[in-house]
Image (cartoon, coloured by chain):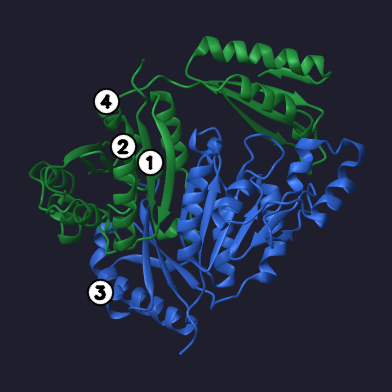
Chain colours: A green, B blue
């Protein structure tokens, strides 16, 4: 019996996402990062720049999952309240972290004013997450990883996060592209396949509906055992061929 | 005293978003749609194709907000379980809806097989949401609006949802583009502005960090009173000019 794979949640923090001003891409970046490590991302939440909301979401998520990743709200301005909220949620202080302060002093020199110095405040017992883009660090405390909202910085921070995570068996995915018929024509075949193989998941993603182009469905076959996934794909292709439906692994 | 603006939450349903296979865009589409109607989107959640998770999230959100909008999981395949989950969450049955069935019969004719017919099941007392792209309807039950996951279909469904919503005062937003300095150089000015005007929000979104291009910050000034927003922008520009910082409304 193998150990179950770690589970994770993402907490996106920022009014700009909920107002529609910004299209979030961090969730997708983190999702792909975790997939590659075999960590199951089970849920995500998006909240505004409100301390109560951040605290509540963080406490729900950190109790339910092995890891929580937050993005946003760690800059120098008045609406950057993530560090305060994390410290509140964990019931710890928020002192200046000597190493974080040294990093900011090196970067800003004489321009290290009070707002920028706020970025040196790290919840007690937290460790820094390196920011190779603009230096001001993120931090880890317990199972919570607090990262920047700017996608380029967030992505760079994941490099420093990866070695700290327990890995799971990576999910193998194969895509079978079915063309010329809609989802409804292959639903019975998929249902039978899903019932026969409980360790394999069969996702169904139609394309082309409402366009002038070709219609069809991408079937995504996923599981942690590569041989079982390959066998499921072979069986699925055989069923589709028997039904006279065009399909190919892509 | 005006009535407070309605509040809303979004629930994105789909393994493909959490696995990283798909970049969600529906949240952003709904966020912009609600902004234009003066409805405050206060939170969003993303869950997988798991009934228990959907039920739990839906019950949390529908109790806390005036409206909940879900996307995904209403197609014909075995992993489309949103209607089942909504019926469970609300404690109602999931019978075939005569009008939904008629719509599907018109579209599919002889090809209306059992999987497609599943799409006619609508929670008791629910009303249909028109789908002008592929016909299979979404539905509204109470304050919950259940829509497709395919962005083109979801967007089209919003047309039929809009007339059912109570509108609020639309938030007015102006963007002041500050160039040549980072967020930390303007944080004190922003903090003072935010403290002086509690009904106005001042968001700060840096750009250009870590690139070869120009750095700067977009300041987004938001509020429901257009005159107050304009006055706040004028005051902010004056403060920035006094500090010798380049800024312009964009």
Residue mark closest to the camera, 3 vs 1: 1
Q: Name the residue under label 1.
A: A9
Q: Residue B141's image quarter?
A: bottom right
> Is residue A98 among what the camera can see?
yes
Q: Name the residue under label 2.
A: A67
Residues at marks 3 and 1, CA–CA distance in whole angstroms: 35 Å
* Camera-nearest residue between B56 and A209: B56
Label 1 packing within 10 angstroms: few (<14), some (14-19), many (20+) = many
> Pointer 2 indicates a residue of which chain?
A
Q: Residue A163 carries which label?
A: 4
Q: What element carries label 3?
A: helix
Q: State left or right for residue B94 relative to residue A76.
A: right
Q: Which residue is the extreme one toward the bottom?
A: B1
Q: Residue B192 carries which label?
A: 3
Counting from the top left corner in percent of width and height, residue A179 is at 78, 26
Residue mark closest to the camera, 4 vs 2: 2
Pointer 3 with pointer 2, Cβ within 8 A: no
Name which residue lies at 57% across and 51% down: B88
Placement of the N terminus of chain A among the 4 image quadrants: top left
Residue mark closest to the camera, 4 vs 3: 4
Pointer 2 with pointer 1, Cβ within 8 A: yes
Residues at marks 2 and 1, CA–CA distance in whole angstroms: 6 Å
* Camera-nearest residue between A118 and B67: B67
């Amino acid at each position: 019996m193998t150990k179950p794979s770690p589970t994770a949640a993402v907490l996106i923090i920022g009014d700009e996402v909920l107002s529609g001003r910004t299209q979030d891409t961090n969730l997708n970046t983190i999702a792909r990062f975790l997939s590659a490590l075999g960590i199951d991302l089970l849920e995500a939440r998006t909240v505004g720049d409100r301390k109560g909301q951040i605290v509540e979401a963080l406490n729900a998520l950190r109790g339910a999952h092995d890891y929580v990743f937050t993005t946003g709200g760690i800059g120098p301005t008045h609406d950057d309240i993530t560090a305060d909220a994390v410290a509140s949620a964990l019931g710890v202080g928020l002192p200046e972290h000597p190493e974080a302060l040294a990093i900011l002093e090196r970067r800003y020199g004489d321009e290290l004013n009070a707002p920028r110095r706020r970025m040196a405040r790290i919840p007690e017992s937290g460790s820094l997450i390196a920011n190779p883009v603009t230096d001001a660090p993120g931090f880890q405390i317990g199972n919570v990883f607090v990262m920047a909202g700017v996608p380029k910085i967030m992505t760079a921070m994941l490099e420093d996060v990866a070695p700290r995570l327990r890995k799971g068996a990576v999910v193998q995915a194969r895509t079978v592209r079915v063309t010329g018929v809609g989802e409804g024509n292959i639903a019975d075949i998929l249902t039978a396949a899903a019932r026969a193989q409980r360790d394999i998941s069969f996702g169904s993603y139609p394309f082309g509906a409402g366009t002038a182009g070709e219609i069809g469905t991408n079937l995504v076959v996923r599981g942690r055992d590569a041989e079982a996934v390959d066998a499921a794909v072979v069986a699925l292709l055989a069923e589709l061929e028997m039904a006279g439906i065009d399909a190919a692994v892509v």
